[in-house]
Amino acid sequence: MRVRVTLVTYASLFVLLATVGWSIALLVRLRDARLRALTGLLAAVALSRVAVLVDPRGSWAVDVSVPIEELPALGISMLAVLVLALLDQTLSRATGKVRIIHDPLTGLPNRIHFMDLLDRVRQRARRQAKVFVVMLLDLDRFHRLNASHGRSGGDHLLLSLAQRLLRCVRPEDTVARIGGDEFGILLSLGRGGQDAIRVVERIEMQLREPFRIGDQNVFATASIGVVVSETSYDSSEELLRDGETAMRRAKVSRGGNTYEFFDPAMHQRVVSKLQLEADMCSGLQDNQFRLVFQPLVSFATGRITSFEALVRWEHPVRGMMSPAQFIPIAEETGLIVPLGDWVFREACRQGAAWQRAFPRESGLSVSVNLSARQFQHPHLVENIGNALISALERTGSVTLEITESMLMHDIESCIHVLEQLRGLGAKIHIDDFGTGYSSLSYLHRIPFDALKIDRSFISGADSTESSRPIVRTIMRLADDLGVEVVAEGVETTEQAEWLKSLDCDYAQGYFYSKPVDADAATRMLETQAEANGNAMEWRAAG
Ligand code: C2E
Ligand code: MG
Ligand code: MG
């Protein structure tokens, strides 16, 4: 067969063949662009080598023919392209598998693979009406460890952790690394909540052993979120999201080193928390927060010596809310800083007003509670100083209440901050004392003025109760440290009398008065002013 074509036609044919070859390369998923181009070229040369013979008559036309001796070369070229393509595909598949579905550091399945497995288990669980468990583990303060031991130290720990986690599960379970320091654990179908707890306990055991980084022993803790999928989930993302919510709760609300189960009510709580957070922002702008005041009464004189300012939120929909319902969220979101600032200024303003109205009550003060986040805020001293200067003429009339747990983190900087606050004329009370597991060994170094015994010990201090020795011990401790004692939560005459017999300095509680608004507190001070400095016996009305 001989075909006569012009040079232009021949060039077009070459380009066409190259394109066909290139397209085939693309079709068989040759990933390397150079290899694709080479395949196209090879195909074009091979096919057009079908024979190009210059027209013996010297015209610009070419003869294209298929001489029989060219056929093996053509076959070999095509075969080479095919082999190359297949080889490339196999190689890319093999290497791709390791790279795409496994975490290169630990060799564990990665997030994508974990999600695939989760999907399969979820569908099987639905078909077979079986339960299964997903856990999310996140190391606590891993960034700090990375910062102090370097990335390679962090990597080393992650690798050891991966190995330890594998020891905590059965071979049919899955451990995956789904993020930097986040691991996913999928227990096999049919394993439920009880199994989850057992696995968590094993993990906690494993974490009790230190990790060896270089020549140092490093301890790590983790927060674990557990989802027991009894209800049917529509997607694996949902499952993972719920695990994450539970894990965050373990980490943020419970301070880490623990685990939390996700339950359906939990998601609802997250949603309403977000709503509350948004409401709180607008509540601050719209002045929805109020202060109520609860008197502290001196055992020696029976008179009110100060008021503790306690915040309330007049929520437009939910009504009056107590601090327990919103302070933790304010803490978590950082809104406690502007809220606390408002509380402090408002309490100072009220305190100054009372001091002006009742000049004879020389020692009258207001107490304000500080939250942990406020206490750690770098501008705390400055803010408090400014508020004090603008609101109060006299020093010694503001008390700041902090809890023991706030003192646990960085003792030296706590001491420094407290000294500065005292320098501004503020008194320091340690609130809820007895519940925070403070290390008694450093208590003597902390500059403070009084211990407030937690109300749980006072309400339990009715004659037969076991709290009495604790209260006595705290009294003795305060005496040794040379500080005063306030008993919180005094509710009955017996409690008041017993505390008085112990030489307790001040009492606070429903026995004297519930927290009341500023007007009612002012009326109390008016009554007290009428008694003209004489001893009194404060009692709650009714
Ligand atoms: P706290 O500082 O220990 O305040 C005492 C709490 O005990 C108050 O609860 C008070 O109403 C309650 N209480 C007083 N006497 C009695 C009693 O005899 N029996 C019983 N059962 N309870 C009594 P409240 O106002 O709900 O405040 C709870 C906590 O919220 C406070 O505990 C304090 O830690 C925190 N808080 C209140 N206001 C603020 C604030 O402005 N800022 C910050 N950061 N925390 C605040
Ligand atoms: Mg308090
Ligand atoms: Mg308290």
Image (cartoon, rainbow, N blue to C red):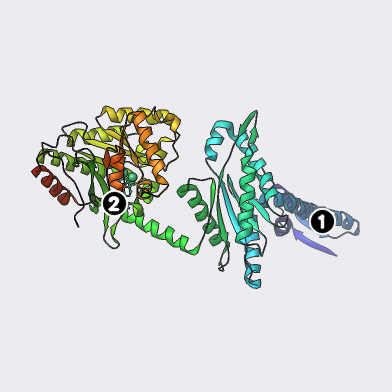
Q: Is mark 2 within 8 Å of ligand 1?
A: no
Q: Secondary structure at mark 1?
A: helix
Drawn side of residue 387 relative to residue 35, left or right: left
Q: Nearer the viewer, residue 302 or 210?
A: 302
User: For residue 133, what is the image quadrant?
Assistant: bottom right
Drawn side of residue 55 relative to residue 497, left or right: right
Q: Where in the image, quadrant-wise, is ligand 2 located?
A: top left
Q: What residue appears at the point 24 percent right and 30 percent down from the top-left corner?
A: 425
Q: Is residue 313 above or below residue 348?
A: below
Q: Is the Cβ of the residue at disc 1 closer than 8 Å to that at disc 2?
A: no
Drawn side of residue 78 relative to residue 296, left or right: right
Report the quarter where the C terminus lies. Answer: bottom left
Disc number for residue 55: none
Q: What residue appears at the point 65 percent right and 62 percent down from the top-left corner?
A: 191
Mark 1 belongs to which amino acid?
Met
Disc number for residue 492: 2
Q: Position of residue 54 (x, y in %)?
A: 81, 53
The residue that mark 1 highlights is: 78
Q: What residue appears at the point 36 percent right and 49 percent down from the top-left corner?
A: 463
